[in-house]
Each structure stands twice: as C-alpha cells, then as structure tokens.
Image (cartoon, rainbow, N blue to C red):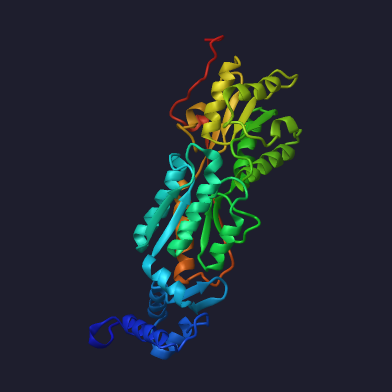
Amino acid sequence: MAGEGGAPLYERIKAELRAAIGRGEYEPGSPFVTQRELCERYGVSTTTAVKALNDLVAEGLLIRRQGRGTFVAEPAARQIRSTSGNSIACIVHGLNAAHVSNVVSGVESVCAELGYRMYLSDTARQDVAASPQREAQALREALDSGVAGIVLYPVEGHHNTDLLTEVQRHEIPIVLVDRYRPELPTDAVIVDNFSIGYQLTQHLVAAGHERILTLWSETDVTSVRDRLTGHVQALRDSGLTVRPEFTSLRPYQQLPQEQRLAMLKPVLEGDEPPTAVLCANGYVVAAAAKDLVALGKDVPTDIALAGMDDAGPFDLLPLTTVSAHLPSHELGVESMRLLSGRIDGTSASLPPRQITLSTSIHTHDSGSGYLRAVSSESA
C-alpha cells in the first residue's frame, strides 16, 4: 500500500511518529503507541503497523521491554543504537569445533535472510582458563556497541552473571545456545540432553552392557548434568546398580594422558570392570580409545565405546557402538529466529522460552564401516 507521493504507507506513518518523538510529544521511557492503536489511527493492517514500529526500534528511537511492550528510548540510548543498526553479536567458544561452527552457520543463515549484521566472537583459545574473561570482554563490547541482541554459547560454569544481568537491564535480548543458566531467566535453545543419556544407555544395556563407565570433558554445564541424569535414570529403569565410581562427574579429556591412565587403570582392573564407556563427546571418544589401547584393551572387542554427541575430531560412528547426532545447524537457526522475534517485537511480550530440539541416535550397524582400536599386545 502506497501513501502520498507513492511512498509506502508505513514510511509515512514512521515519519510522523519519528517527528512526534523529536518534538517531545512522547516522554523518554514512557510507553509508546501500540500496534493496535496504530492500526486504528491510520486504518492500516497489523503488518504495516509492525513494520513501522520495527524500523523505529532498529533506528534506536524505541526499545522493546520483554513482557511489557514498546517504550520511547532515552536520548543517550538512541544515539548508541542508531549507529549499530540491525546488528547482533554471536559469542561462542571453540569455533574450531565442527559442532560450534555449524551453530554459527545456522545463526548466520538467518541473519542473511532477515538482514542482520552479525559480529562474531570466539572466547575459547588455547588458554582455556582465560575463556570467561574473553566472554566478559565480548559481552562488554556488544553492550557498548548497542547491538540489537546477543546469541551466546556460554563458557562452562556460572561466570559473568552480573554482566549478563546488566545486558538485560539495557533491554538487549539474549538467547543462550546448547546450555542454559538456571539462575538467569533468559531464552535458550538446547537439545534434549536427558534423552541422549537415557537412550544411549538403553542401547548399551540392550546390547548386554550392565557396567557402563562415563567419561566427561566439561562438567559444570546443564547439558552434561542433564545427560548424566538421563543415564542414571536409564540404569534404574533397567534394574541396574548405579555405581558412583562409574558415574562420577569429573573432567577427563582435558587431563594429560598420564593422569587419564591413572584414572582408568584401577577401574579396569577392578573385580567388576566396565564393559562399555559412555563418552561425553567425540574428543572424549578419541582420548578414551587412545588410553584403552595404551592399557592393553581392544575397542570394541574388550570394551565398547558410545558417544553422547558428535562434537569431535572425526566421525564417531565407525569407532562407537552407538552415538548421538546433534542438530548443530538447527540450534543456530532456532536461536537466531527466537532472538529476531524478541528484537522485532513479535515475541517481546512473552516470558523467557526454552526451545528443546530432538536428536538422532546412530548405531554401529547403521554405519558404512567400522574401526577397531587394537593394543600392541593383541596386534
């Protein structure tokens, strides 16, 4: 629909509203005209009203407050946001991993579709201990740049809570990916990690494995804890004993091999050693296969491996009895769509959402081939 002079009607509405804000007809911080009021005032469709309001939000004249509506921006906020346009920050850790890069690819694809500029930050480098500080720096830069929203793949632990709260106070929506923060009410897109732990354990039990050792990488994240909960529940539902020495949640993959071997050896030499190892991800699968061979075990003849996700240095399936496949690209797509809804106002009034995506389970039999890891003693 065109307005006077052939310009789109929403442009005329937007110009009138912009001028009214400039004249001070709306107090900074006060509620602004609603979509419904615009439709009634100008006799236009909801689509036209939403587009006019969205453009004013993108220009920094208006802000969305989750659960409350649209408000007139303070003059200082207008200046910051007007320089950033429709830009979002995507903050991840471990971009060199295929899983993370596929998440970023999903975010990027929706940005390209909807016209957002994406600023990418990788908070994980070789110095793992400094990663929370790099996350804080990336969050601060996003805040100072006045981005319209943030997609965050958080580091392990409960870091930067105060800074994330500050971002929320500035009415900048945040969507967490892969894991959530129970103490921080914000949107999150995750996979069904409980189901991963449960289903993989069921497969192993059905294959005759009653003593299953779990090995981890990160430990202080909800994704890992949910997987462990699913594993333990599957053991109980199968009538099996939950052995603390097998289900202990402690780091493994990031340790030097000497320490990893020291962890494994007494367990493998016990009276009732595990017949299967449930690994947190592909990196743990690789480390476990190497260590088991060093301790004289053949994989999978002596001990079977299973992978809780396919984030790792290679395709897991040839080396594992069963593994889970993460919808990495879809995680990024859904995260950015959720963030876009918060930015453009279509879901600004809704409470925080947690979207849970399903995963697929792949068995050894479904692969095109398989690998064995054989110790030198049996080669």
The residue that appears at 51% across and 30% down in the rendered structure is 365
Asked whether residue 147 is in view, the answer is no
The residue lying at 50 percent from left, 48 percent from top is 134
* Location of residue 107 in the rendering, given as x and y in whole percent from the top left corner: 42, 54
Q: Position of residue 3 (x, y in %)?
A: 28, 86
Q: Quadrant of residue 218?
A: top right
Q: Nearer the viewer, residue 314 or 173?
A: 173
Query: Residue farthest to the left?
Result: 5
State the residue at coordinates (73%, 40%). Answer: 237
Q: Is residue 44 above or below residue 226?
A: below
Q: Is residue 276 above or below residue 70?
A: above
Examine the image and state in which quarter residue 268 appears.
Answer: top right
Question: How far across and down, in percent of the image, does residue 92 sit?
Answer: 48, 48
Of residue 94 and residue 372, the one placed in the foreground of this image is 94
Q: Position of residue 90 (x, y in %)?
A: 45, 54
For residue 270, which quarter of the picture? Answer: top right
Q: Is residue 30 visible?
A: yes
Residue 232 vertical position relative to residue 29 in the rendered view, above or below: above
Going 42% across and 90% down the picture, which residue do you hit? 41
